[in-house]
Amino acid sequence: MAQANIQVEIVFATADEQMLCVLTVPSDATITDVIEMSVLAEHFPEHDLDALRVGVWGHPADRSQTVNDGDRIEIYRPLEIDPREARRQFALAGRTMSNGRKD
């Protein structure tokens, strides 16, 4: 019997650019398989995608996890600044995180 294929999305973003790929993969594909099948590593060669954390629909996941039809695999970059520190800096400047302007 032929193996069924499923459709998944994989996303990665930098501060300047984001990319979403829709892929058709075997139903037993893992997150690692999906990353390797995508063009993200070629498009973002300056990032070591193998070293970054991953998740599915905003929930942390192990790379060996099998994907399901309709999953959205997300590759997370490290934070450039702690969110609490960012809020402190905005508050000191009289701005808010939501609009970056003085209110």
Image (cartoon, rainbow, N blue to C red):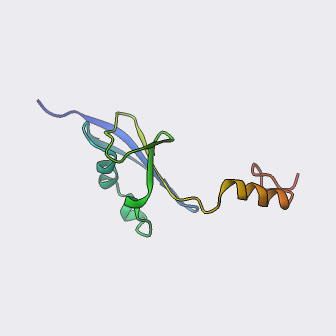
Decide if residue 16 is in sight here.
yes
Q: Is residue 92 left or right of residue 24?
A: right
* Residue at (34% x, 52% y) in the render: 35
User: In the displayed structure, would residue 69 be above or below residue 49?
Assistant: above
- Counting from the top left corner in percent of width and height, residue 55 is at 45, 45
- Counting from the top left corner in percent of width and height, residue 52 is at 44, 57
Name, please, the residue furthest toward the top: 1
* Residue at (53% x, 60% y) in the render: 14
Q: Is residue 36 left or right of residue 103?
A: left
Quarter of the image containing the N terminus? top left
**Image quadrant of residue 66?**
top left
Name, please, the residue furthest toward the bottom: 46
Decide if residue 19 is in sight here.
no
* Residue at (33% x, 41% y) in the render: 65
User: In the displayed structure, would residue 66 be above or below residue 63?
Assistant: above
Name, please, the residue furthest toward the left: 1
User: In the displayed structure, would residue 17 be above or below residue 60?
Assistant: below
* Residue at (40% x, 37% y) in the render: 71
- Counting from the top left corner in percent of width and height, residue 18 is at 51, 56
Q: How many marks?
A: 0
